[in-house]
C-alpha cells in the first residue's frame, strides 16, 4: 500500500510576534528545539513515509524558503498555494495530486508543521494504526489526543462505538468554555489534533458527497489548474466541510506528548526548563526569577525578581507581556502603529 504524507505549513503565527513575520513564520523557526518546526515534522515522519512521498503545502511567498530549508525534498513536492483557502481546499488539492502520482488507493497522512511531539516513536506507531484502519475500513480516520488538561483552546472529539482499536466519531465540538472542557475531559473526549489519515479515493468520494463549497472547483484541480482552483474555491476547514458531515469517520486515541505550539506560553511545555522553570533561548540570565518564557536574539536579557512573564527581544524591539496575556497578541497588534507592527 502506497503511503504519502502531507504537511500543512502555511500561516504566519501572529501569536509569536515579534519573532514570527510573514517572511519568517513560526514553522521556519526553532521554537521547540534546535531545528525549525517544519524540519522536525519532516524528520518525525521520515521513518514512516519517504521524503520523496512527502508534500508540503505552504504560502506562495514561502516556497523558496521551504525548499532552501529542506534541499533533500523534491522541488515539485513543495506546493505553493496562491491563496489561503482553509484546510479543505488544501487537502483536496493534495489528494488530487497524490492520486495523480500514485492512484486513488494511496493512503494520505496529513499533519501540521507547527507541533511539538515528545514521543516520536509513539507518534509514528499511532499514525501506522490510523493508516491500517483507514485502509481496512475505507474510512476517514483522525487521531484524537488524550487530553493532559481541560484546555478551552482546542476543539474536542466525542468517541462513540468501538471498531477494533478505533472508535466511531459521535461528534466534533468547537472550542468550549473552560467548564465545558473540564466536563468533556472527565467524560473521555479527545482533543481534535488535526491529524488525518485516509485513502485518497475515500476522501475524494466523501468530499464530493458532502462538501458543496469545493465541488464546483474540483474539475480545475483534476486538470491541474491551481490558479483557477484556488481562485474559485470557497474557503472552509476540512472538519466543517467533510468530517462533520460524513458518517465514515473514525478516531484513534493518541498519547505521545503532542503539543500545538500556539502561543509563547506553550514553550514552557515543550522547551527544556531551568531549575526555576524558565524556558529560555539565547543569552538569558534569570536571577530570583521563575516560570518565565524568554527569547533573546542577538541581545542579552536579564530578569530579576519576576515570574510568569514572556520577554522576546530581537532587532531593537522588545516585547514584554505575561504568560496569561500571551494568547492576546493579535488584539495587541491591532493597537500598534504600523511602523512597529510590521518591523522586520
Image: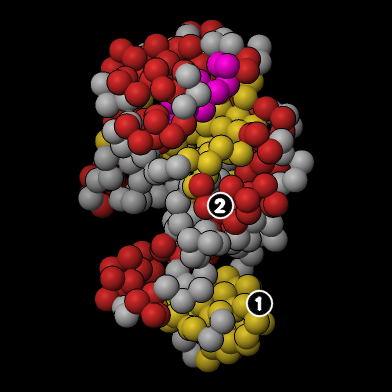
Q: Which residues are magenta?
A: 90-100
* x and y, in percent, of residue 299 in the image: 63, 85
Q: Which residue is mark 1?
A: 282
| Residue 78: image tag | none
Residue positioned 64% across, 64% down in the render: 272
- Give the vertical position of 180 relative to 226 (above or below): below
Q: How is the image coloured?
A: secondary structure
Q: Main secondary structure of the magenta part?
A: helix
Asked if marks 1 and 2 touch (Cβ < 8 Å), the reply is no
Tell me, yes or no, if residue 250 can be seen here: no
Q: Quadrant of residue 41?
A: top right
Q: Position of residue 144 (x, y in %)?
A: 44, 33
Residue at 39 percent across and 34 percent down: it is 230
Query: Residue at label 2?
Result: 62
Q: Nearer the viewer, residue 213 or 297?
A: 213
Q: Is residue 224 above or below residue 234?
A: above
Residue in view at x 60 percent, y 33 percent = 55
Q: Secondary structure at mark 1?
A: strand
Q: Percent from the top left, x then y, of residue 165?
A: 51, 17
Whether residue 99 is in magenta: the answer is yes
Secondary structure under the numbered disc 2 in the rendered image: helix
Q: How many marks?
A: 2
Query: Residue 143 magenta-drawn?
Result: no
Q: Residue at x 46, y 31 (%)?
A: 226
Amino acid at each position: 500500500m502506497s503511503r504519502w504524507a502531507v504537511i500543512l505549513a502555511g500561516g504566519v503565527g501572529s501569536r509569536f510576534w515579534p519573532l514570527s513575520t510573514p517572511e519568517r513564520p513560526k514553522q521556519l523557526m526553532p521554537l521547540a528545539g534546535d531545528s525549525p518546526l517544519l524540519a522536525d515534522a519532516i524528520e518525525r515522519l521520515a521513518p514512516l513515509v519517504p521524503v520523496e512521498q512527502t508534500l508540503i503545502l505552504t504560502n506562495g511567498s514561502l516556497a523558496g524558503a521551504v525548499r532552501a530549508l529542506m534541499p533533500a525534498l523534491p522541488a515539485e513536492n513543495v506546493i505553493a498555494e496562491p491563496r489561503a483557502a482553509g484546510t479543505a481546499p488544501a487537502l483536496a488539492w493534495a489528494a488530487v495530486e497524490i492520486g495523480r502520482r500514485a492512484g486513488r488507493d494511496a493512503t494520505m497522512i496529513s499533519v501540521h508543521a507547527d507541533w511539538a511531539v515528545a514521543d516520536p516513536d509513539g507518534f509514528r506507531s499511532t499514525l501506522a494504526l490510523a493508516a491500517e484502519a483507514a485502509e481496512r475500513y475505507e474510512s476517514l480516520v483522525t487521531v484524537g489526543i488524550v487530553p493532559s488538561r481541560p484546555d478551552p483552546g482546542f476543539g474536542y472529539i466525542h468517541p462513540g462505538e468501538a471498531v477494533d482499536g478505533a472508535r466511531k466519531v459521535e461528534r466534533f465540538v468547537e472550542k468550549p468554555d473552560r467548564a465545558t472542557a473540564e466536563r468533556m475531559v472527565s467524560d473521555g473526549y479527545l482533543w481534535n489534533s488535526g491529524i488525518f489519515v485516509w485513502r485518497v479515493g475515500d476522501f475524494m468520494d466523501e468530499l464530493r458527497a458532502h462538501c458543496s463549497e469545493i465541488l464546483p472547483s474540483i474539475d480545475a484541480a483534476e486538470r491541474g489548474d491551481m490558479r483557477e482552483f484556488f481562485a474559485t474555491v470557497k474557503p472552509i476547514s476540512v472538519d466543517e466541510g467533510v468530517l462533520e458531515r460524513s458518517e465514515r469517520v473514525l478516531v484513534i486515541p493518541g498519547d505521545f506528548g503532542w503539543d500545538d505550539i500556539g502561543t509563547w506560553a506553550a514553550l514552557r511545555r515543550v522547551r527544556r526548563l531551568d531549575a526555576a522553570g524558565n524556558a529560555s533561548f539565547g543569552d538569558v540570565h534569570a536571577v530570583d526569577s521563575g516560570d518565565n518564557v524568554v527569547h533573546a536574539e542577538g541581545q542579552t536579557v536579564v530578569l530579576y525578581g519576576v515570574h510568569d512573564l514572556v520577554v522576546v527581544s530581537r532587532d531593537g524591539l522588545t516585547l514584554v507581556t505575561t504568560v496569561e496575556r500571551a494568547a492576546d497578541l493579535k488584539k495587541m497588534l491591532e493597537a500598534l502603529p504600523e511602523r512597529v507592527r510590521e518591523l522586520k
